[in-house]
Every structure is written in C-alpha cells, then in structure tokens.
Image (cartoon, rainbow, N blue to C red):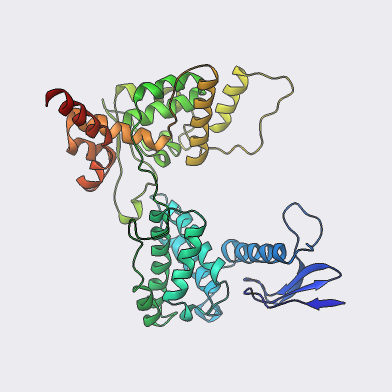
C-alpha cells in the first residue's frame, strides 16, 4: 500500500510504496501528471532513502526546466512560477546573446549556472512572490557551496537581470524587481563568502620547462597564449577561417569572446613567432578547429604506446577551457615526475604573464590594446610582477 510522505518543497507528491519512493508530478513540458520511480544515477530501482529521493526529484525537475526542447508558445502558457519564468528567460537569452555566427555565446551557459541556484531554493514558487529575503536565501546557499564572493555577486546579478527582463515584459509586477534591487552585492571582508586568491603571473621559465612534457598540440597552445595574451576561451575556438594571414602581422578575430554581446570587436595580433606555432595547424578545413583533442590523444599514444589501448570515445572536436587546463596540469605533473622543477600554473596565468611583459617593454596602453581591455584599470590588475621589480629596485637603490 502506498504511503504518503511529508510535504516537500517540490511540486507534486513524493510517496513511498513497498519501501521505495516514487513521485507523481507534472513536469515542465508535460501535459499531464504521472508517477515515476525515483532512481538515483547508476541505480536500477527506486531508492529506499527519502533524502536521496528528494535529491533525485530536484535533479529531474531541473533537467526538465533547463533541457526541455519545448519553447513557450505564448505568455498564456506560463504558469507564473519561477520554473516557467526561467524557461522563458532562457528562450530569450538564446536569441539575444549571440556571436557573429548567430550562435549562443558563453553568457547563456553563465545564465544557466546562476539560475540553477534559483531552482534549487524555490522550484515552484510564484515568480511575483520572489522577494529580497528569498534572494538572500539563494545567495547564502551559493556561499555554502564554496563559491567565491565575486562569482556569488555575478550570479545574483544574473538573477536580478532576469527579473528586470520579466518586469519589462509585464510577466511580473515591477515592484517585484524593485524589491530585489534593495539587496546589495557582497563587500570584501564583510561576508562569509570565500575570497579568491588573486591570479598572478608565472615566470616564463616554468612554462617552457613544462612544454616538452605536453603533447605538441597542447605545447603549441600554451606557448601561443604566452606570446599573445589571448584568453583560453579564444584559444580553443580558433579556426583557419578566423585568421587573416596576408600581412606581416596576422589578425585573429574570434567568432565569440567575452564582450561580443556588447558589440565589441576583438582582434588578436600574432607576430612571427606565433605564426610559426600556428602554421602547422592551418592544414585543415577552414571551419575546423585548429587545436584538436583527438589529435593530441594520438600524439600522446604515439609517445606512450601501450598495446591494446583504445582512443577514448568522449573526445570532442575541440578543447574546452577546462580540458585545456587539465592538459596543462598533466604536463606539469609529468615534468615533475621526470625531476624537473616547475611551479603550478594554469592557462589564465599565461595571460597575466603576457600583460606584465608587454606593459614593461611597451607601456600600459600597449598592454590594454593587446589584451582587448576597454580601460586601463583592468589592465593594471594584470601587472603583479612590476610590483616585485619595484621592490627589488627600492632594496638595491634605496
């Protein structure tokens, strides 16, 4: 006999039947409610644990909200709850945050990450009832996951932006959005949020010490980023069609970049040394990515051949910033196993190192131009080694 369980913050009814948990609910995109077993990942049967059942139910609800292929036909289809609002905003974001090729930018992924916290806290709450205290509750949940203060503020800002859009579309009362504006961002040293360690430059000698232990593809990416100061996200999406190679200085125009949605154009200048690094990777179709993880894996297999090994099937057609960073870390570990003294570093530090070198040799304006920054204050944050040099000069000269 089915046993009705205590009330959950999730919609529908989570109930126990013969010791296992089930959920009767109408998911976003469905026309009718139906009962479904709450089976954890890797399991075959419905769970016997209530806490696990609620976690599986929440994950199922999130998946329905964020991955439903059914677009809202009209505002009459909206239920007025937070989940419906999230779906509507994501449909808008996919058509608004586009790169030059009319493809969604990384901002859409950032929006999804932020709104998952909202669904965690209040999956079925009426959108117009979401007020400052609920926003603070969501923010506290972010802090407790270990997110840094800057990331928390960024994601809270995205949630506010969604409610601003909803107010402009008359999906919620304007005063709902105005109430959220009363919640200020977290201030340094005045919250429980983790303060991230500042990203510092890395001495080029450590970078070059690790390169022999990377695959040729990853070594090329690492050295090119060190020379040009481009972002990792710009590096991994490079294609032959994005390069202008007719002049003495090559011009790389990424199909998408951090501020593309604001109408800013980004051009990376590549000199002779960088050109020699890229040249072997241009021998492919114009619309293929220059740096292929599948090719890097073949290079690794050739270097570390083990009979019977197979190429992983999960390799994509290009690196992500995460997989690129993982490859760099692997090279560092391999160098250390070989007895090489090399410090830990990640790809973003290469950008800082390039900024410091350019600023030292050519000035702050040149560093700003190379990095693609819109103001000098941001560029100045990338020059930590200058402070070290100034200290050494003061110690020596008085």
* Quarter occupied by residue 84: bottom right
Q: Residue at x 68, y 78 (%)?
A: 7
Q: Nearer the viewer, residue 95 or 179?
A: 179
Q: Position of residue 207 (x, y in %)?
A: 40, 24
Is 386 positioned to the left or the right of 230 in the image?
left
Q: Reply above or below: 340 against 132.
A: above
Residue 12 locus on image (x, y percent): 68, 77
How far across and how far down the image is residue 66, in percent? 57, 62
Question: In the rendered image, which quarter is residue 240 located in?
Answer: top left
Decide if residue 296 is in sight here. Answer: yes
Quadrant in which the N terminus is drawn? bottom right
Task: Report how many numbered discs are placed on residues in the image.
Answer: 0
Q: Is residue 115 above or below residue 205?
A: below
Residue 286's place in the image compared with 63, above or below, is: above
Taking depth in this image into account, of 105 and 10 the one nearest to the observer is 10
Q: Residue at x 62, y 74 (%)?
A: 9
* Position in image of residue 48 (x %, y %): 79, 63
The answer to which of 114 and 231 lies nearer the viewer is 114
Is residue 162 rendered to the left or right of residue 379? Answer: right
Q: Is residue 35 left or right of residue 279?
A: right
Tell me the quadrant of the picture where the C terminus can be found: top left
The residue at the point 50 percent across, 57 percent down is: 113
Residue 229, can we see it? Answer: no
Q: Work out whether 119 lies above or below 106.
A: below
């Amino acid at each position: 006999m089915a046993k009705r369980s205590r009330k959950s913050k999730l919609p529908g009814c989570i109930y126990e039947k013969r010791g296992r948990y089930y959920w009767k609910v109408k998911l976003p995109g469905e026309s009718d409610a139906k009962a479904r077993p709450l089976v954890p990942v890797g399991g075959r049967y419905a769970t016997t644990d209530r806490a696990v059942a609620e976690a599986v139910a929440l994950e199922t609800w999130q998946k329905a909200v964020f991955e439903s292929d059914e677009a809202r036909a009209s505002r009459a289809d909206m239920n007025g709850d937070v989940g419906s609002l999230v779906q509507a905003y994501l449909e808008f974001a996919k058509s608004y945050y586009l790169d030059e090729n009319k493809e969604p930018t990384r901002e859409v992924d950032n929006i999804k990450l932020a709104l998952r916290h909202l669904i965690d806290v209040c999956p079925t709450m009426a959108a117009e009832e979401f007020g400052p205290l609920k926003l603070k509750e969501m923010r506290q949940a972010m802090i407790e996951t270990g997110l840094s203060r800057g990331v928390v503020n960024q994601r809270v800002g995205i949630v506010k932006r969604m409610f601003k859009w909803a107010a402009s579309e008359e999906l919620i009362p304007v005063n709902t959005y105005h109430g959220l504006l009363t919640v200020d961002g977290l201030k340094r040293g005045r919250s429980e949020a983790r303060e991230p360690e500042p990203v510092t430059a890395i001495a080029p000698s450590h970078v070059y010490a690790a390169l022999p232990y990377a695959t040729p593809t990853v070594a090329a990416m690492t050295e090119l980023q060190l020379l040009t100061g481009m972002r990792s996200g710009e590096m991994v999406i490079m294609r032959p069609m994005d390069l202008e190679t007719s002049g003495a200085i090559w011009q790389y125009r990424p199909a998408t970049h951090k501020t593309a949605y604001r109408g800013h154009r980004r051009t990376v200048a590549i000199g002779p040394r960088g050109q020699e690094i890229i040249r072997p990777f241009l021998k492919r179709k114009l619309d293929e990515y220059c740096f292929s993880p599948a090719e890097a894996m073949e290079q690794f297999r050739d270097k570390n051949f083990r009979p019977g090994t197979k190429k992983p099937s999960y390799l994509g057609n290009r690196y992500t910033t995460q997989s690129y960073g993982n490859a760099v870390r692997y090279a560092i570990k391999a160098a250390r196993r070989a007895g090489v003294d090399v410090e830990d570093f990640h790809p973003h530090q290469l950008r800082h190192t390039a900024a410091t070198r350019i600023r030292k040799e050519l000035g702050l304006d040149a560093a700003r131009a190379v990095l693609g920054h819109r103001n000098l204050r941001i560029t100045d944050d990338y020059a930590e080694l200058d402070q070290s040099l100034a200290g050494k000069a003061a110690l020596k000269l008085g």
